[in-house]
Amino acid sequence: MYFLVYVDDIILTGNSPTAIHNLIINLNNRFPMKDLGTISHFLGIQVVPTSYGLHLNQSRFAQTILSRAGMTNCKPVSTPFQPKSSTTLTNSNAFSNPSLYRQLAGSLQYLTLTRPDLSFAVNKVCQHMQNPTIAHFDALKRLLRYLQGTIYTGLPLFRDKPLLRSFADSDWAGDDTDRKSTSGFCNYLGSSLISWTVKKQTAVARSSTEAEYRALAAAATEVVWIRGLLRELNHDQITPTPLYCDNTSAIALANNPVFHARTKHIEVYCHYIRSCIKDKTLGFHHISTKDQIADLLTKALPAPRFKDLSDKLVFSPEPTA
């Protein structure tokens, strides 16, 4: 049996209904508890049974955000964030209601628990919560318009073999203001997406290889933690976890035991990744850029490309009869 506990909300699951029933009776004798039956709602996340497993979504919370913004009847758009334009968002007047901006951006952060397709756009709007401008609020409104057309989109969980695999990518010098890169990675257990990250790198990368290597190191850290958790849950990963990257130079650097002068500044990352390769925790594999799922987490994309990649992360639940 496994427990997931958050304050006074508990999910209990296991492979013996009788044992679960007896445990609930014993717990009820010691604590005031209420058995709500099969899971359907947890911490604002709706759980919908499907033919393939479960579908997690936050449609009610999404509708609440749109209502708070006064955009329940807005016109949907195909992508949450516009691709780069020549106009910088900093050349704009201050937004008159920064509290509203912060409330909406904070709410959207929680929504990304089941919406990885929103993660990059939410990351961008949250970088300006201190002093939002009108242009920043326009970007946030575009995100909300995309949300309007994808209310019921969420995270599918499949019944299949729990084999871990990872995708990592970066957008080198993608931020126009400080030229820092954005790292993105996502981890699948079988066909189910279980974790993902969008994060601006803390230092300016001097090459695309360095930016990609930093993203690989971040993904490697997450993979090592997940492998440890799966070991505790009796699903030990016997083989090295494949980590897919579309930068051949970063893969070559990961497998090369010789340091060069031009890579000394990322030596710490090199040591960590190479130790993961040496102990067979990770195996690095090249993947074509067009098949790199993590590309969605690092930059704004045109509508066709965005649609192609987001369909590999999230989709709407099957219609019920």
Image (cartoon, grey):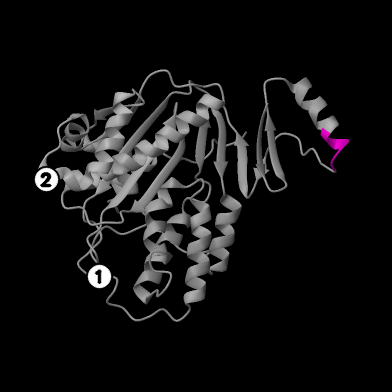
- Residue occupying the point 85% across, 36% down: 28
> Residue 272, percent across and down?
31, 36
Label number found at residue 262: 2
19 on left or right of 275 = right
Residue 215 x/y as whole percent: 30, 44
Q: Position of residue 268 (x, y in %)?
A: 27, 42
Which stretch appears magenta? 27-31
Secondary structure at numbered mark 1: loop
Q: Earlier in the sequence, mark 2 or mark 1?
A: 1
- Residue 223's label in the rendered image is none
Which is more toward the observer, 81 or 3? Answer: 3
Q: Residue at x 15, y 44 (%)?
A: 263
Can residue 35 be seen in the rendering of this structure?
yes
Type of amino acid at the residue the image marks with label 2: Arg
Residue at which label 1 appears: 88
* Dominant secondary structure, magenta: loop
The residue nearer to you, when weighing 146 against 263, is: 263
Residue under the point 20% across and 46% down: 210
152 versus 69 height, above or below: above
Most extreme residue toward the right, as rendered?
A: 29
